[in-house]
Amino acid sequence: MRAVGTILFLVVLATAVATFARRRRIPAPSLLVIAGLVVALIPGTPALRVPPQAIALVVLPPLLYASAEELSLRDLRLVWRPVTVLAFGLVLASAAALGVIVTAVTPLPPSMAFVLGAVLASTDPVAVTALGRRLSLPGRVQVLVQAESLFNDATSLVLFKVAVGVAVASTTVHWGPAAGQFVLLAGGGTAVGAVAAGIVALIRRRTTDPVLETVIALVTPYAAYVLAESAHTSGVTAVVVAGVLLGRSGHRLSDARIRLQVQAVYAVVVFLLESVVFSIVGLELPTLVRDLPAGSGRWPLQAAAVAFVLIGIRIVWMLPLAAVVRPRRDGPSWRTAAVVTWAGTRGVMPLAAALSIPLTASGGRPLPGRELVLVLTTAVVVLTLVVQGLTLGPVVNRSGLALEPEHTAHEESTARDALTRAALAHLDGLSGMETVPEAALARMQRNLSARLDHDGSGGTPADSADAVYRELRRDVITVQNTELRRLYDGHRISDTTRRRLQTDLDREESALGDR
């Protein structure tokens, strides 16, 4: 009963704080972490201990899936080389550098220092997506930041397993088996994710019930994760691959009414899970600090040093890469490097990995330094979420990379005009055909022409109850959907504009009612 009350309290607290953050245009993850810390420091607040499987199995799959669905596969093709370098090279470099620094500045043995390096080496997709959702970054920069955090899991997970094996069994590192394990985790997770996406796509093509479609959408990330973990591959990679593939083909798998319902339900789920999990990060830190052994009072300075090293490595690694990911031809590469560097926060996944470190080493003796690794991991997560999260917006604005509201509005207005002209051209081709009543055709042409004149998105006309008119409007919406995909595939509009216009078309089609 107490656990239920704690969960309800977290939901209420997180919802209130996240709502306030949205109104004040403050990054919600940063404010949620601070709120969690404040609550945890109140005298009488019970200690919070979250099982690692609760985060890894319950929270991560839907959040990763939602983030992967938002990823623009078109833009990903343009930045796959730097994403690959970041997902492999930067993770390895970060883990190695952290291992050396942590050994020098903390009492952790080298094996546990390497464990901490592997835990914190990769950026967190949940935090990165949550922080970047309101930033007006160019498509290539946004995809670079998001894709790096989504695809570096296999690298960091292999490093983590190797490091934990060395720390627990006191063995030496065998890089040959480690490379094979990486292939199994990354390749196997990709295969499972692709198979899961294919099966779900087949099911969704044969489903017209909105409730059943919503259930399938909610179950999909959990199914991909569990199947991959059961096959001893990367569950996170499987969820990401399934999300990217299904996100790309989602408009072909269901109708407008179903898409709108699934989006609404998923928005609620993501909002609640993100709000609760970032509150937990803040709530857990004081509890972990109380469990530290005597003589660990310098952990704040040690955590600051670790965070500083992580940011420094990203800066050094990012500068040469930024030259090939310029959002504009005349855009200085250092500005791109600054934004991508500062967006590389740590979050939920490092915390889940640290919590999964075994309690004992070989022989049953306690694993030395486990408590300090947990505290440093959580402290670095809190530091990056608060410091980088609260300052990421100003960094983006100062960089000059942020798209101006006028630019976004002009792109959207131009795209709406293109959709309307495509619809009018289609109607012109129907003129004179006996199958289409002239009255319905003329009425539709007037409504579309009015949109061009007034530059408005319009809506379903009041007299759309007429069956012939409704069928004609559905036909026009189909033409506009085709034109929208053509504009997007031709790189004439951004993914953000495409999603916004697709939602508007779905709302119009849904308002027409059933056939």
Image (spheres, helix red, strand yellow):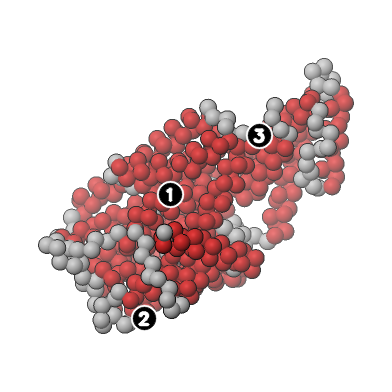
- Kindly tell me whether residue 144 is visible in this rendering: no
What numbered label is drawn on residue 424?
none
Q: Earlier in the sequence, mark 2 or mark 1?
A: 1
Which residue is label 3 attached to? 482
- x%, y% of residue 406? 72, 59
Mark 2 and 1 residues: CB-CB less than 8 Å, in contact?
no
Please state which of the two labelled residues, at mark 3 or mark 1, is closer to the viewer.
1
Please state which of the two labelled residues, at mark 3 or mark 2, is closer to the viewer.
2
Looking at the rendering, which quadrant does residue 469 occupy?
Answer: top right
Which residue is label 1 attached to? 61
Looking at the rendering, which quadrant does residue 198 occupy?
Answer: top left
Residue drawn at x 36%, y 72% as measured from the top left: 287
- x%, y% of residue 468? 79, 25
What amino acid type should be assigned to the residue bearing mark 1? Pro
Give the CA distance from mark 2 to mark 1.
33 Å
What amino acid type should be assigned to the residue bearing mark 2? Leu
Q: Residue furthest left?
A: 363
From this view, report whether residue 123 is shown above or below residue 189.
below
Give the CA distance from mark 3 to mark 1.
32 Å
Secondary structure category for the residue under label 2: helix
- x%, y% of residue 196? 41, 37
Q: Which of 410/106 is in front?
A: 106
Residue 376 relative to residue 147: left or right: left
Which residue is label 2 attached to? 301
